[in-house]
Amino acid sequence: MARGKADSAFFDTGGKKISRQVVLPFRKSLEISIKSIRVRFFRSMITVIGLILAVAFLGFVLAGAEVASGLLHSGDPELRSVLIKSGYDLPAEPPQDGDGRVLPESVGTGAKERWIVILSLLVCTVGIVNAQLMAVTERFREIGTMKCLGALDSFVLRLFLLEAGMQGLAGAIIGAVFGAVAALLAGLFRFGAAALVWLPTGGVALAVGVAVVVGFVLSLVGVVYPAVVAARMRPVEAMRVQE
Amino acid sequence: MDTGHNIVRVSEVTRTFRLGAQMVQALKGVDLSIQSGEYLSIMGPSGSGKSTLFNMIGGLDKPSSGKVYIDEVDIAQLDAYELAWLRNRKIGYIFQTFNLIQVMTALENVTLPMIFAGMSNDESVEKGLELLGLVGLRERHAHKPNELSGGQQQRVAIARSLANTPAIILADEPTGNLDLTTGEEIIALLKHLSSERGVTVISATHDHKMLAVSDRVVWIRDGRIDKIESRDQLNISVGTISSKDA
């Protein structure tokens, strides 16, 4: 009595492949994610603020190093001593090789500073995972309903990645710009106008770019696990009556 | 699809859940055939396995043993795409808790399954408005679910379940969260859809108002089918129930 789906008029898809029969166009998924963010704007803001702060810190440290290296490469011994006084680990005189040529040197970010930045980024990622897991729990009925309406796992995954991606990009840009501006202001305050005169603009732009990319990537990394949890949810969950 | 062929067939289905260390058997071997175009109610007290059976029929849950056939195709054989396709095109779900997507307007809720089915935006909006008109909510299409009453939300959900002209409508306690009059309206609407459009309506309920419109009623008790009554047998038992209540 049982038969294969090929013989069933019920399962007739008009000759098209069934995997192409359930779709969610990219424009539509973008629309849905933007709507979700807008509706939960306050919640999204709180998630994003954590990212903004961490990325701002990263941007501050990177751009601060650029300010310092601009001053160092000015070759002005006075600026050099100011740098040494403000805590940069430099010899009093520029190092020279045997023929009296000045060797290239650099002021990077200190090891301690690097660790604090890495830690803050880690904490921020954990925060994102936490916030997104809560978002999944909060929305499990919505996800289950979508699945009952025919959504594939990939639709749910895509919606969550899009949302996190947009939040991440916005947060990372705001944070990076904020951090870089703060670093410039701090440079201005510590070293005076010289900080801006010798500023390697390309380097600062690169620092901002690096901070944006790091923030964006972290927010995507943070959402992967929660999004997979959401995508794997069985539609029957939507039927459960919540008490 | 002519009436008379089995659109859903459940064969020796059992379902066991793990509750802590204990195994609980919610369904203990159920056989049931549902004809195309039928209005079938699954009745039973809570905990009887009614919802579990219902979820099996809808392809939302898998049996521990036994088979569920939709149009004589074993749904255990279907892959994720085929299941999604089935849910999208062939089955319309109505829930006790309405389950509208809160961030979307009534119209967007109704058009979502059509978007999944690959329909163009204009087409889906047009059909969505038509379906909202059918349930009497065309003017309220721009409202979000939280701006609608329970009855209105359930009507939007019914419009949504019809989005891709499904062959089967599965309604899980559709009147469970509604007052008496609104519940009656919803039942009348479902009955109308079943008789006008030839849609198979399968509804899990313990609302006795459902009995009067059902072609057949399946009574579930303790994980088994207690009895199946067709409408003519039913009138008598409805009488006894109401006289018992009185």
Image (cartoon, rainbow, N blue to C red):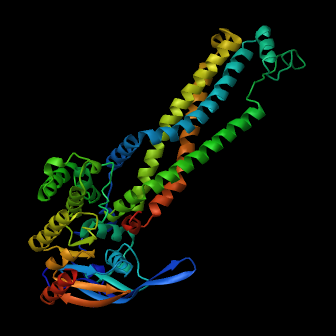
Q: B88 or A127: which is nearer to us?
A: A127
Relative height, residue A37 to residue B19 (above, below): above
> Which residue of the protein is positioned furthest toward the right in this rendering?
A98
The part of the image, by quadrant, that contains residue A118 is top right
Q: Is residue A149 left or right of residue A92?
A: left
Q: Residue B196 lies in what quarter of the image?
A: bottom left
Q: Is residue B41 left or right of residue A84?
A: left
Quarter of the picture containing the N terminus of chain B is: bottom left
Q: Is residue A111 above or below residue B192?
A: above
Q: Quadrant of the C terminus of chain B?
A: bottom left
- Residue A194 visible? The answer is yes
Residue extending furthest toward the left: B196
Q: Position of residue A2 (x, y in %)?
A: 29, 88
Classify residue B32 by image quadrant: bottom left
Image height of B46 relative to A160, above or below:
below
Q: Position of residue A46 (x, y in %)?
A: 51, 39
Residue B9 at what x, y percent from top left? 28, 85
Q: Nearer the viewer, residue A66 or A46?
A: A46
Give the camera-side residue of B239 and B120. Answer: B239
Where does residue A156 sit, x and y in percent of width and height?
41, 56
A175 up-or-down from B192: above or below: above
Q: Is residue A2 left or right of residue B196?
A: right
Q: Residue at x 28, y 65 (%)?
A: B88
Q: Is residue A202 visible?
A: no
Number of marks in picture = 0
